[in-house]
Image (cartoon, rainbow, N blue to C red):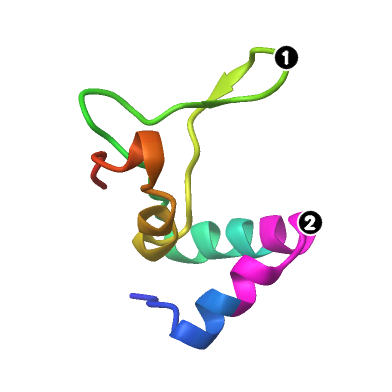
C-alpha cells in the first residue's frame, strides 16, 4: 500500500489545481481507494451557487489535514 512521504505530501499540497487533480486521479486508480470524512454522515462542502459535494482524498493523511473547524470532530 502507498503511503506518501512527508516530502511527497508537502509537494502535493503545494500543487495548483490541475496537477493536484491529476495526482489525485492517478493515486485513486493505482490504489483503488479514496478517503472521506464521516460522522453521522459524510462531511459535505459547497460552492457559491449552493451545490453540495462530498470531498474525497487519495490517502488518509490528506483527509486528516482537512479535519479542521467544522470538520474537526469528524473521523475517517
Q: How many marks?
A: 2
**Residue at the disc numbered 2:** 18
Percent position of residue 5, x then y: 44, 85
Residue at x 56%, y 77% (from the top left corner): 10
Instruction: Please state if 50 lies on the left or on the right of 60 as rendered.
Output: right
Closer mark to the observer between disc 1 and disc 2: 1
Relative vertical location of residue 17 with respect to residue 5 in this rendering, above or below: above
- Give the overall secondary structure of the magenta segment: helix
Dot 1 alpha-carbon crowd within 10 angstroms: few under 14, some 14 to 19, many 20 or more: few
Percent position of residue 50, x then y: 65, 12
Instruction: Please state if 13 lies on the left or on the right of 1 as rendered.
Output: right
Residue at x 20%, y 24% (from the top left corner): 40
Percent position of residue 56, x then y: 48, 44
Q: Are marks 1 and 2 in contact (CB under 8 Å)?
A: no
Percent position of residue 17, x then y: 75, 55
Dot 2 alpha-carbon crowd within 10 angstroms: few under 14, some 14 to 19, many 20 or more: few
Instruction: Please state if 20 lies on the left or on the right of 54 as rendered.
Output: right
Which quadrant of the figure has residue 3?
Answer: bottom left
For the residue pair 74 and 35, the one nearer the viewer reads as 74
> Which range of residues does the magenta coloring cover?
11-22
In the image, farthest residue toward the top: 50
Amino acid at each position: 500500500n502507498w503511503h506518501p512521504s512527508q516530502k511527497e505530501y508537502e509537494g502535493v499540497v503545494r500543487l495548483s489545481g490541475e496537477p493536484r487533480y491529476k495526482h489525485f486521479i492517478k493515486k485513486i486508480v493505482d490504489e483503488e481507494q479514496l478517503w472521506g470524512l464521516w460522522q453521522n454522515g459524510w462531511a459535505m462542502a459547497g460552492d457559491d451557487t449552493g451545490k453540495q459535494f462530498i470531498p474525497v482524498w487519495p490517502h488518509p493523511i490528506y483527509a486528516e489535514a482537512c479535519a479542521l473547524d467544522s470538520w474537526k470532530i469528524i473521523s475517517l
